[in-house]
């Protein structure tokens, strides 16, 4: 398994293809495999890099007592430096979009492009969103300790489908991704949940995001995600916002052809300015394109 030491954690990653570099950041409770269809399609023309965030997948647990968006950003920064990746297009899903957005605002000159899929900014902007992300998410931790993550996740998906019809999307795809993959430890789940529930201070200044940006959100996505997409459209200087027909809160799984096509169009327009990584082998001496395992623990 290709791993590299980045910011104090052994990070699992996969690199495939050759050409301008695209780095994919997965959603919470999943892992790098959530991007498999996009990687399969795009690695014929681009160098694709996927990795597992700390607490997830084959990267797994770490000694940090708390996780934050800024910590995930620091991990990503260290990973790119260790792999000698310069000016990639960064593509993030859900919480991975939050990480990608914060990275783009922190290092505005270091990206050729930014793709946000079903993403949200790390601040709270309404009482409803505060309740959903701070109270409801945090309330999942005790049941997970008692009943296990998979049972609680299925109940949460059931409730989401009734409160926000269609937002749950193709949950069977999530379950297939999870099969055979490493599970998530309960304490890691708690740290990841708290990282999403905690607002960033100071808030991300969207006006500092200088990279061309593509925002994709599901037609049936959660209401606060659709509101954030509108906020991105209003405040990110160079942005294209598109609704993904029929998709819920995992647009790349619910409508993979549409999302892959939109990302490809964006890459054709903007990825030509990326620099290739200096070395096509990983830190263990393996050639690019290692085949990794499947999914994380929850949507």
Image (cartoon, grey):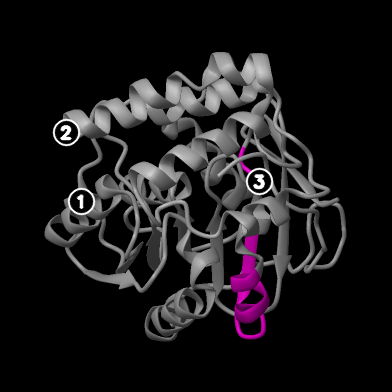
Q: Which residues are magenta?
A: 37-53
The residue that appears at 48% across and 58% down in the rendered structure is 169
Is residue 44 located in the magenta-colored stretch of the structure? yes
The x, y position of residue 192, in whole percent, is 53, 28
| Mark 3 vs 1, N-terminal side | 3
The residue that appears at 68% across and 76% down in the rendered structure is 40
Q: CA distance from mark 1 to mark 2?
A: 10 Å
105 to 49, vertically: above or below? above
Q: Residue furthest front?
A: 162
| Mark 1 vs 2, N-terminal side | 2
Crowding at dot 1, Cα within 10 Å, few <14 / some 14-19 / many 20+, comes out as: few
- The residue wearing badge 2 is 126
Is 290 displayed left or right of 33 in the figure?
right
252 to 298, vertically: above or below? below
Please tell me the numbered disc located at residue 52.
Answer: 3
The residue that appears at 17% across and 63% down in the rendered structure is 237
The quadrant of the image that shows the C terminus is top right
Residue situated in front as seen by the camera: 121 or 103: 121
The residue that appears at 41% across and 59% down in the rendered structure is 248
The x, y position of residue 286, in whole percent, is 87, 61
Crowding at dot 3, Cα within 10 Å, few <14 / some 14-19 / many 20+, comes out as: many
Please tell me the numbered disc located at residue 227.
Answer: 1
Residue situated in front as seen by the camera: 293 or 51: 293
Q: Are marks 1 and 2 in contact (CB under 8 Å)?
A: yes
Q: In this rendering, which labeled residue sits more in front, label 3 or label 1? A: 1
């Amino acid at each position: 398994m290709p791993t590299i030491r980045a910011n104090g954690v052994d990070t699992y990653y996969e690199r495939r293809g050759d050409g301008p570099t695209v780095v994919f950041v997965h959603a919470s409770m999943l892992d790098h495999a959530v991007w498999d269809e996009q990687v399969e399609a795009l690695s014929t023309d681009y160098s694709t890099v996927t990795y597992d965030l700390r607490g997830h997948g084959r990267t797994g647990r770490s000694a940090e007592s708390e996780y934050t968006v800024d910590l995930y950003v620091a991990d990503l920064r260290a990973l790119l430096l260790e792999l000698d990746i310069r000016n990639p297009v960064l593509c993030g899903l859900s919480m991975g979009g939050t990480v990608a957005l914060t990275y783009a605002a922190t290092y505005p000159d270091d990206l050729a492009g930014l793709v946000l899929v079903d993403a949200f900014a790390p601040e709270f902007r309404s009482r409803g969103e505060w309740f959903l992300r701070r109270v409801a998410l945090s309330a999942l931790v005790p049941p997970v300790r008692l009943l296990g993550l998979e049972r609680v996740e299925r109940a949460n998906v059931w409730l989401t489908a009734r409160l926000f019809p269609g937002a749950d999307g193709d949950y069977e795809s999530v379950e297939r991704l999870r099969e055979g993959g490493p599970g998530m430890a309960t304490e890691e789940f708690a740290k990841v949940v708290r990282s999403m529930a905690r607002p960033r201070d100071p808030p991300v200044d969207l006006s500092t995001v200088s990279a061309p940006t593509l925002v994709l959100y599901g037609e049936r996505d959660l209401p606060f995600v659709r509101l954030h997409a509108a906020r991105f459209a209003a405040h990110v200087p160079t942005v294209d916002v598109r609704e993904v027909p029929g998709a819920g809160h995992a647009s790349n799984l619910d409508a993979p052809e549409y999302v892959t096509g939109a990302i490809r169009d964006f890459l054709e327009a903007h990825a030509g300015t990326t620099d290739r990584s200096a070395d096509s082998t990983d830190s263990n001496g393996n050639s690019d394109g290692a085949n990794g395992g499947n999914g994380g623990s929850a949507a």
